Amino acid sequence: MSATKIIFRVHDYDLAATLDSGQAFRWQEQNDSWVGVIGKHWVRLTQTSDGIRAESVAPVAGWGFLRDFLQTEINLAAVLKTFPDDEPMRIAVAACPGLRLLKQDPWECLASFILSSTKQIVQIRQIVSVLCEQFGEPVFSLSSQKGGEGQGEEANYFRVQIPSPQPSPRLGWEREKNRSCFAFPTPQRIAAATEAELRTCKMGFRAPSLLAAAREISEGRFDLERIRRLPHAEARAELMKLRGVGGKIADCVLLFAYGFDSAFPVDVWIERALQRLYFPRRRASEQRLRRFAATHFGPHAGYAQQYLFHYMRTKLK
DNA sequence: AGCCAGGCTTGGT
DNA sequence: ACCAAGCATGGC
């Protein structure tokens, strides 16, 4: 089974910064590439001089899913033009031109951010990784005996050599091979688990929240697709009905999965960034910072937030 | 309204 | 080595 490839010709796209900027938690750097799973597709992405090269192990019917995920059609320059013309924004953009927003699957995004509360990015990655290994369907099977006529999911798997160049010294080869080979578990699968089982993934007190969301969704009481069609404020209110989802997490899902570009997640880091960059002389209340953010950054405030966040994380600390 | 919920990283000694 | 603090929070 030969790998299939495509090149997305896109400029001002910083792949590494984008995949590693705290919006998605499943991408791993492998040599000069990034490996991850989108839906049922394992993919390897590499930044090249003329864009982004994508490789998959199994042949894919089309690359629309990846174009959509990476948002390569977005005219970034046009987005940047809508930012306020002030010193902090200029510096934040200059620090990482080419930082983008992805468009992720709503369930994966929601579940990941329910698991994110009071966790640092490294820990969120660990939790999500174990969750996928434990409950996710393999996106391809290493030892499947089945040919093409199985009726279940198996028919979609392929017997392949995973093109993973070198084992990392810290995780053994076996473990390394198996990472990123699982789809994100469905709401149905999570709903079928017990709280105790979920807790083995080290998610602690977030387990009941994840379980509740999975049940609401799998039993049809909560419709993730309906959110997409609601106005911003209503969509936000709807998401916040879920246990474990407050304003910050709702904003993350609105921005990273549903493409509400004006959503502006405010966490400790953004709060500090706003305080330092926009109110250096006197201390501004959380209220004030929030109100300022809601009006100051324009229609693509979410992009602005991502630049401020990245700048804060990498340069200001 | 303040405290609690885990566990891992970070930074001090 | 060890230990304490601090988390890209929200619920009760």
Image (cartoon, coloured by chain):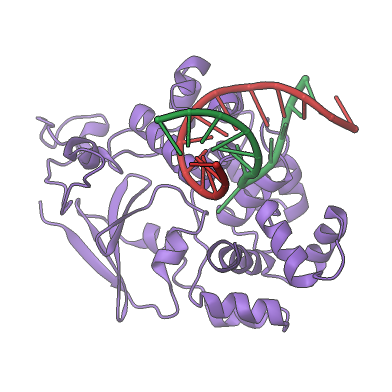
Chain colours: A purple, B red, C green
Q: Which residue is more in the foreground, A133 or A259?
A: A133
Looking at the image, can residue A263 be seen? Answer: no
Q: Position of residue A20 (x, y in %)?
A: 45, 58
In the rendered structure, the answer to whether residue A68 lies left or right of residue A270 reads: left
- Is A295 located above or below residue A42 in the figure? below
Counting every numbered tag in the picture gives 0
In the rendered structure, the answer to whether residue A125 lies left or right of residue A217 reads: left
Q: Position of residue A116 (x, y in %)?
A: 57, 40
Q: Quadrant of residue A144?
A: top left
Looking at the image, can residue A230 be seen? Answer: yes
At 43% from the left edge and 59% from the top edge, which residue is drawn? A19
At 53% from the left edge and 65% from the top edge, which residue is drawn? A314
Q: Quadrant of residue A276?
A: bottom right
At 82% from the left edge and 60% from the top edge, which residue is drawn? A289
In the rendered structure, the answer to whether residue A71 lies left or right of residue A158 reads: right
Q: Position of residue A5 (x, y in %)?
A: 21, 65
Q: Which residue is more in the foreground, A89 or A24?
A: A89
Q: Quadrant of residue A113?
A: top right
Q: Where is the C terminus of chain A found, in terms of image quarters? A: bottom right
At 54% from the left edge and 76% from the top edge, which residue is drawn? A95
In the rendered structure, the answer to whether residue A121 lies left or right of residue A247 reads: left
Q: Which residue is more in the foreground, A75 or A44?
A: A44
- Is A256 located above or below residue A183 in the figure? below
- Is A57 located above or below residue B13 in the figure? below
Q: Position of residue A111 (x, y in %)?
A: 54, 37
